[in-house]
Amino acid sequence: MGTLADHIEAYIKKMLRESQTNSVELSRAQLADNFACVPSQINYVLATRFTLERGYIVESRRGGGGYIRVGHVQVDDSYQHAIKLLQSIGPELDERSMEDILASLRDYQVISPREYQVIRGIIQQEVGTVSAGKDILRASLLRSLLFFMIKLEE
Amino acid sequence: MGTLADHIEAYIKKMLRESQTNSVELSRAQLADNFACVPSQINYVLATRFTLERGYIVESRRGGGGYIRVGHVQVDDSYQHAIKLLQSIGPELDERSMEDILASLRDYQVISPREYQVIRGIIQQEVGTVSAGKDILRASLLRSLLFFMIKLEE
DNA sequence: TGAATTAAGGTCAGTAATGGTCAAAGAAAG
DNA sequence: CTTTCTTTGACCATTACTGACCTTAATTCA
């Protein structure tokens, strides 16, 4: 009936729902303590369930006064298509797939022709500067740019 | 919420904003007294948050009548400032340099605190998913996100 | 005048407080 | 039985804070 990770996930989502601001600040050690598990379990939950593709943004800081902040974007219906495509981006992305995603977003008018050009140009430029890991970089860039765009227009 | 250092930082920045001249003169001992901490804590705050990279100039004098003066360098055009910072990003970018750039952009109000957070979070998350080439990815991501932001606004 | 005193600020190493990473072991699912 | 997901723990990295000790400048006063 649900793993530990599921419970931690649910707990964080509940806090998120109850927050006015759609974001919560956690203490990794304390949360781990609440659930009687090792701290790294928290990282596991965050890494597997609170990803960009799912609309979450996780930010943290170490050291004294450190924290983990989790934010959630409520995605508008008009962006459902964009989110689907975002989710389809894995750890790597070849050029062809990127073109397909961008063209689709443009055709569905999720992004403007201008945004299409800008994003395409940026990625081409950046990917051209590295010799290895092009597909990984492409995946990261497209994911980030799309998310950032959606986030800004929210 | 926030460490002592954060509060001292905020306090100095507030004074800076309220000053006509973009500079303030502090008494280390008195400031430490206000915040009920040791004087060297003030040095810590100055050394970590009011660096030249972030656009601050700190000068001081010891002995009787000693003082600490903090100035925020005036920037002609924040848009140009952003361009300069963008250009300063090389093929690799370590975490500290990224923090400096983002903090500077935030302090010069090129990006909002919210954008600061989101960009920081996106990069943290993406960089966390790769095992090698973190600095390269960081450089690409920051360059792209800032470039994208600026492109859309102009 | 110049040594002693007073009044600042500076340094640095050590300690405490957090969070991060990674690989291996264990559990669940197919 | 194999694969995938979960959990753990040892080790790592970063940030904050403190206190003992040091340096410099102004003032006092013999």
Image (tube, coloured by chain):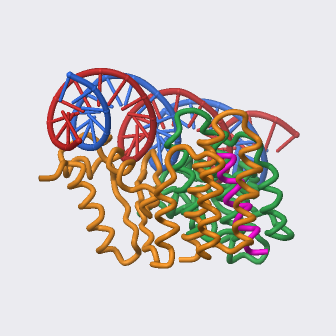
Chain colours: A orange, B green, C red, D blue
Q: Is residue B6 left or right of residue A17?
A: right
Residue B3 showing in the rendered view? no
Q: Nearer the viewer, residue C27 or D18?
A: C27
Looking at this view, is B33 or B21 the one in front? B21
Q: Look at the magenta stretch and give its main secondary structure.
A: helix
Does the rendering let one see residue A38?
A: yes
Q: Position of residue A133 (x, y in %)?
A: 63, 36
The mark total stands at 0
Give the quarter of the image for residue D3.
Answer: top left
In the displayed structure image, the side of residue B75 where residue A114 appears, left or right? left
Q: Position of residue A109 (x, y in %)?
A: 62, 76
Q: Is residue A32 left or right of residue B51?
A: left
Q: Which residue appears at 60% of the width and 52% of the height?
A: A97
Q: Position of residue B31 (x, y in %)?
A: 57, 61
Q: Which residues are magenta?
A: B138-154
Q: Residue furthest left?
A: A1
- Let me know if residue B153 is in the magenta part: yes
Q: Residue, x 71% and y 49% (percent of image)?
A: B63
In the displayed structure, B40 sits above or below B131; it is: below
The residue that appears at 70% across and 53% down in the rendered structure is A123
Q: What is the x, y in percent for residue D20?
A: 49, 33
